[in-house]
Amino acid sequence: MALTDSISVFAEGTPEEQVQELVDYLVRGRSDEDREALVREFAEAIESKEGQKPFNEDDERRRQVFSRLLSEVKGLGDGNEKEIDGFFNMIYAHIFALYPLDSSEITEHVKILLQVISSASTDKPSRKYRILSNLFNAIPRTSHLRSLVYATILEIATDKDELEVLNLSRSTVEKWLSEWDISNMDKAAFAKTVADGYVKCDQREKAYEYSLTSVRLLPAASAESHAAAFNLIADALRLPSVFNFDPLIKLDVVVAVKNHELFSLLQIFLNNGLAEFQTWLANHPDTLKEYDLDKSHLERKIRLLTLTSLSFKYIGQDLPYSKISETLQIDLAGVETWIIDVIRAGLVWGKMSQTNQALHVVRSTARVFEKEQWETLEKRVLAWKTTLTGVLDVVATAKRHNGIITPPQAA
C-alpha cells in the first residue's frame, strides 16, 4: 500500500450540490421513510431563506450542516469502489475547506471518520486501506493528523495479521516522525504503536527496530523511560538475531540506567565474554527471572559473541580448535558445531580444516570498534601493504626479465 506526499483533494460543483450528492449516497439502502426525511432535512438546511447569507458564503452554517452529515456516516456505504472513494474524498475536501488544520474541530471530525471506517463491515479490507491512504495523502506532511490516520491503518493491519501489505520500513517511519508537528513523547508513542503491532504479529525482530526508535525519543530522566530502557535491553538480549548492541548502549535513556544490573549485563554482551557472564550470573541470580531471560539462551549467545571476538584476532590466520574449546569451555568434539553456528549467524566467515584442526578465519565482525580494533586494523593494513609491495616487486622483476617497458608515472 503506497503512501505518498501530500496531495490535494478537490470537490466539483457548488457547496449545495456537493451536500446533495453526499446525502444521495448516504440514503442508499435506507427505508423510504428514512430516505425522504433525511433528504428533506438537508434540503431545508442548505436553502437560504430571506435575510440569510447564501449557503456558499455562510461558513458557520456549512460547518453545522457538515457536522450533521458526518453523524449520518455509519459505514462505507452501498457503492462500488469508485463511488466509495468519491464519497470519502468529498468528505475530506469539506473537512479541509471548513476547518483550520490545527483546530480541535478537525481533529474530532477525523477521529470520528477513523472510527467509522475502521469498524465498518466489509468483505474487502483493502477498501479500508485505500480510503485511509487517500486521507493520509490528502493531509499536509507536517500535520499531526497523519499520525492519527496511520495509527488506524496499523490497527486494521495488525488485527488482520497482514502488516506486510503496508510495506513499512523504519526509514519511512523515522522520516514521518521528523516531519510531523507533534511532541517527542507522541512520536515515541507512535513508534511504540508500530513496535507493538509487530509483536502482536509475532515479528519481534522488526518490533525491536521500532522500539529503538521509540526509546530514543523519550526523555532520559522519567520512570517511564527507565522502564522502557529495561524492556528494550531485555528484548535485545532475548532475541536470537540481535548481536549488535552498540546502537542500544548509545541511547541516552539506556545510559541513564547505567547503575542497574541489567545495564552491566548489556555491557558484557557488548564487550566481554563467557567468563564475565558467568561471574555476573553468580552475583545476580534473580535478575534473569525478573526480566524473563533464559539462561541457556544467553549462554549460547555469549558463546557466539565470544567466538566472534576470538576470530577477530585471527583474521587471515588459522584459529586452532583447541583454542576455541578452551575459550568457550566446551569439548573439542563440539567445536565444529559452534563454528557452523557462528558462521550461520553471519558473525564470522572462514573455512574449517579437520586435518589441521583449525578454522581459517577470512572475516569476523567487530562487536565494537574502538582503540583496540583500530590498532588491529592498522596492523592488517600494514601487513597487506607489505604483501602488495612484494607482489609488485615480483611483477616488476618479471617484466624486466621479459623486456617489457613500463611507462613512467607522473609525480
Image (cartoon, rainbow, N blue to C red):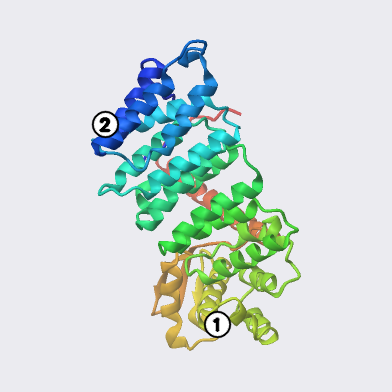
Q: Relative to the observer, which residue lies in front, 141 or 303?
A: 141
Residue occupied by mark 2 = 82
The type of residue carrying mark 2 is Lys
The type of residue carrying mark 1 is Lys
The residue under the point 39% across, 15% down is: 14
Q: Relative to the observer, which residue lies in front, 115 or 17?
A: 17
49 left or right of 299 in image: left
The residue under the point 47% across, 66% down is: 241
Residue 319's place in the image compared with 281, above or below, is: above
Q: Position of residue 280 (x, y in %)?
A: 67, 81
249 left or right of 211 in image: right
Q: Residue 247's mark?
A: none
Look at the numbered discs 2 and 1 and tell me whether their residues touch, using CB distance below 8 Å: no
Residue occupied by mark 1 = 295
Q: Is residue 6 visible?
A: no
Quadrant in the picture for residue 286: bottom right
Residue 311's place in the image compared with 275, above or below, is: above
Q: Relative to the observer, which residue lies in front, 305 or 296?
A: 296
Q: Position of residue 16 (x, y in %)?
A: 39, 18
Q: Position of residue 93 (x, y in %)?
A: 44, 26
Q: Position of residue 22 (x, y in %)?
A: 34, 28
Secondary structure at badge 1 equals helix
Nearer the camera: disc 2 or disc 1: 2
